[in-house]
Image (cartoon, rainbow, N blue to C red):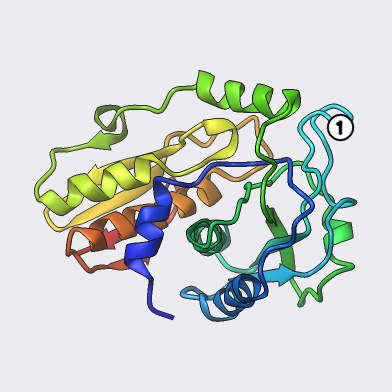
Amino acid sequence: MELPVDSWYRAIFKRRSRRNYAASLPEKEKIERLEMVCREFRPFSGARAEFVRSRPERIFKGLIGRYGRVDGAPYYAAFIGDMRSSHVQEATGYIGEGIILEATGLGLDTCWVGGFFRPESVSQHLELRENEKVLSVTPVGYAVEKKGFSEKSLSALARSRTRKSAVKLIEGSIKAPWMEKAIEAARLAPSAVNRQPWRFRIEENAIIVSVDSPRSVSPISKRLDCGIAMLHLELGARAAGAIGKWEFLAPPEVAKFLF
């Protein structure tokens, strides 16, 4: 499947995480489109997405009781990785964000959920292959018009960690216009508790993505977050006319985008 650069790049600036959903069901054609993208958007081995036409009430759990839960979503998508793959986390993040951006472009709401869901409940809705694990999920539907107290509190917590400027994220100097657009798109990627663990090293014709440090207080891999940023980076580069390819690297580096 070719990247739908125009629609996904625009979706980067529209996407917002939502946890409370209305009763109205998404239109049939939108769901069929998401199902098709889940089947066909598999650019890397060792990772895939599955759309699930089941209400996920039993899947999501709150930070404390019902605080931070996802409520009312009619459907969800699961992001699955083959744990034998050395690049499973970043590949799953990249593919999962593609589904998120497709849903956003369709006018639907989503929310990355990596640490507060029940994998055993997900496994009742889909068939996992040997060595596969559900690394993250997202609700899919139409969010309620107004946020409730819990959702507002979580949004405020995320905003309290303001996004790092590009200067704090890059090593080296920008060498081409496409690099600036690519890094700005990557800077806007979602991450667990808005920790923004990605760093970018500029080379003559490439950008190398790495994690800021191996330490983490979250059960969600920083490399998964970096996989999300990888897709944003590539979309920004392509929107600027630069077509490149990814090469996975060994820790603490994640991948190189070579123009």
Determine the residue positioned at 66% across, 25% down: 152
Q: Judge left or right: residue 27 versus residue 88.
A: right
> Residue 138, how many percent across, how many down?
67, 54
Q: Judge left or right: residue 122 versus residue 214.
A: right
Q: Which residue reaches farthest top?
A: 160
> Residue 188, how many percent across, how many down?
40, 41
Determine the residue positioned at 60% across, 45% down: 221
Q: Which residue is mark 1?
A: 66
Q: Judge left or right: residue 75 versus residue 106.
A: right
As shown in the figure, which amino acid type bears the numbered disc 1?
A: Arg
Question: Is 128 drawn above or below residue 76 in the view shown?
Answer: below
Question: Is 241 drawn above or below residue 181 in the view shown?
Answer: below
Q: Residues within 10 Å of mark 1 (few under 14, many from 20)?
A: few
Can residue 157 be seen from the camera position used here?
A: yes
Determine the residue positioned at 17% across, 64% down: 241
> Residue 187, how many percent across, how many down?
36, 40
- In which quarter of the view is residue 63 placed? top right
